[in-house]
Image: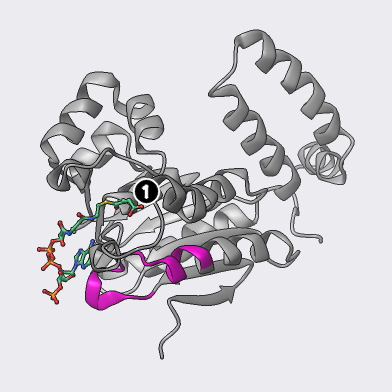
Amino acid sequence: SEPVILVGTHAGVRTLTLNRPDKLNAANDALLLTLTDELRAAEGEPGVRVVVITGAGRGFCAGQDLADVSGRDMTFTEHLNHTYNPLIRTLRGLGKPVITAVNGVAAGAGASLALAGDIRLWTQSARLIEVFSNIALVPDSGSTWFLPRLVGYHRAFELMALAERVDAEQGRALGLCEHVYPDETFREDVQAYAERLAARPAHALKLTKQALNAALTGTLGEALDREAELQQLAGDHWEHEEGVTAFKVKRVPQFMRE
Ligand code: T3D
């Protein structure tokens, strides 16, 4: 049978494609566990500098596969702790940038996954829906953490309570994505963006991601202490020397050495 996650690598960019297109890539356990395993595998591969998560077909991810819920031998809490939560933790903890390339509808936990990316790129026809309340569940997989930080408490509550569709234009205005690309060129535009990111200093970006994620939950004092500590790690790395040397001799820095 078809693999639930397709894996491809081109020019330092590892692309993980959710592959249940007939169901808009609704997530079953195999999809969630495989995606988490693939993120962990990407961490260990030096040739992979950026990871892209996207969907096959016309959807990005329609959230939990609702055909898989009844008769399950796990509580909701157990299920989240077994599948979605390790996925979101792994994504945000990964020492490499993760781009969520939202090629179509992102609903429920699929919306959470879309928001969890370090960089979020949407196609023109993408839609994000905090659909949980339609089936009388609460937003999970990090949506209650991501969304209010992006749009504030009140807009987040309204989007969640009414399960309103956010289109690409609104998504960009609300800060739910960094860029919107035309449907016709989306895959190429995502690859080009990812390659641009792959050419940046990987070690410095790893530390930057670590610092930003910790700063979102801590105090200013903690952030200043952490910056001072991580700056030493960045400053001692060859990337820093390369950047400074390139600046002085007026050439483009070459960060793709390893
Ligand atoms: O641990 C736990 O289990 C709790 C975790 C919860 C996390 C969650 O994500 S809860 C939220 C679950 N997701 C939903 O409730 C979304 C359900 N889907 C929709 O509302 C709509 O499909 C969309 C708004 C996403 C897209 O609408 P549309 O009109 O573009 O497409 P469609 O025709 O509804 O869907 C196309 C097919 O995909 C269709 O199958 P068919 O009729 O062609 O055979 C549809 O049934 C299937 N599909 C879509 N979403 C799901 C799904 N099948 C199973 N599960 C889905 N979530």
Q: Position of residue 200 (x, y in %)?
A: 66, 49
Residue type indicated by callout 1? Phe
Residue that sits furthest to the bottom in the current view? 1
Q: Is residue 242 above or below residue 34?
A: above
Residue 28 is inside the magenta segment: yes
Q: Is residue 207 left or right of residue 197?
A: right
Label 1: which secondary element: helix
Q: Residues within 10 Å of mark 1 (few under 14, many from 20)?
A: few
Q: Position of residue 199 (x, y in %)?
A: 65, 55
- Which corner quadrant of the image does residue 31 belong to? bottom left
Residue depicted at 30% across the width and 21% down the height: 152
- Residue stretch rendered in magenta on the structure: 19-33
Nearer-the-camera pick, 80 or 75: 75
Up-down relation of residue 122 to residue 46 (above or below) = above
User: Measured along the vertical axis of the image, is residue 116 above or below residue 146?
Assistant: below
Q: Is residue 184 magenta?
A: no
Q: Can residue 37 be seen in this snapshot?
A: yes
**Whole-percent x and y of residue 155?**
21, 25
| Picture quarter with ligand 1 | bottom left
Occupied quadrant, residue 125: bottom left
Is residue 251 shown to the viewer in this render?
Answer: no
Q: Tell whether circle 1 marks a residue whose Cβ is less than 8 angstroms from ligand 1.
A: yes
Q: How is the image coloured?
A: one colour
Give the residue at mark 1.
76
Q: Quadrant of the C terminus?
A: bottom right
Q: Quadrant of the N terminus?
A: bottom left
Residue that extends furthest to the top in the rendered view of this protein: 221
Location of residue 51 in the rendering, given as x and y in whole percent from the top left corner? 56, 60
Residue 189, compared with residue 225, is above or below; it is: below
